[in-house]
Image: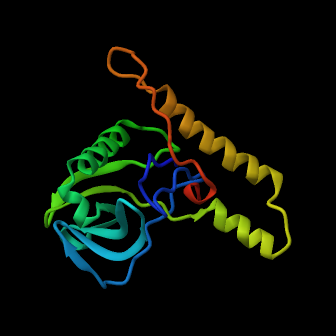
Amino acid sequence: RTLWPGIYSGETPVATIGSKPANARVPPMSEPFGRYELLKRIAGGGMGEVFLARQPGIQGFEKLLVIKTLLPHLNEDEEFVSMFLDEARIAARLAHPNVVQIYDLGSEQSIYYIAMEYVHGEDIKRIWKQSYHKQQLIPIPPALRMVSDAAAGLGYAHRLADAQGKPLGLVHRDVSPQNILVT
């Protein structure tokens, strides 16, 4: 699944491959955040923080997801707020097997947030480091699959057009090993 600019990790895991994992139960340590419960901080960057979260429902229903928040001091900066909202609006238009889904955009406790699909996986940088420390190469078939699936998600986003068929000209700004998740 590909994630659009700046969405999670050091800022963003942008692609994952493989099937959707089952939602594992997470310990009930949580902090309320509107209709969500923040379970743990996943990452932070220059614009925001990313949290593993739970969306509780009735009769034991719950869904794990990721909440990206804009840093509190940036909520007052119109330029950063505009970039954050644009990121969410653009990402919400993307519907592809290699693109993480956006569920919600809102403001809670005067902090803007994006709620998105939780994908449990390892980033390629971490996979490479593990392989390096074991003095093993990543086998060619999985390596090709990783690149192919990431390229498929990015290609889809690049070709996306508006309702009149005019290309939107989207280009991902942070394609890097730490921004590609493998499930």
- Taking depth in this image into account, of 28 and 127 the one nearest to the observer is 127
46 displayed left or right of 106: right
Q: Residue at x 47, y 60 (%)?
A: 119
Tell me: 166 left or right of 159. Answer: left
Question: Residue shown at 38%/75% (left/top)?
Answer: 41
* x then y, percent, for residue 149: 62, 43
85 left or right of 90 in image: left
Residue 58: image quadrant is bottom left
- Is residue 160 among the parts visible in the rendering? yes
Residue 64, picture quadrant: bottom left
Q: Which residue is drawn at 47% across and 45% down?
A: 99
Q: Position of residue 110 (x, y in %)?
A: 14, 63
How many marks can you see? 0
Q: Position of residue 98 (x, y in %)?
A: 53, 44
Q: Does residue 66 appear anywhere in the picture?
A: no
Quarter assignment of residue 36: bottom left
Q: Please say if 169 is above or below 32.
A: above
Image position of 119 with respect to 90: above or below = below
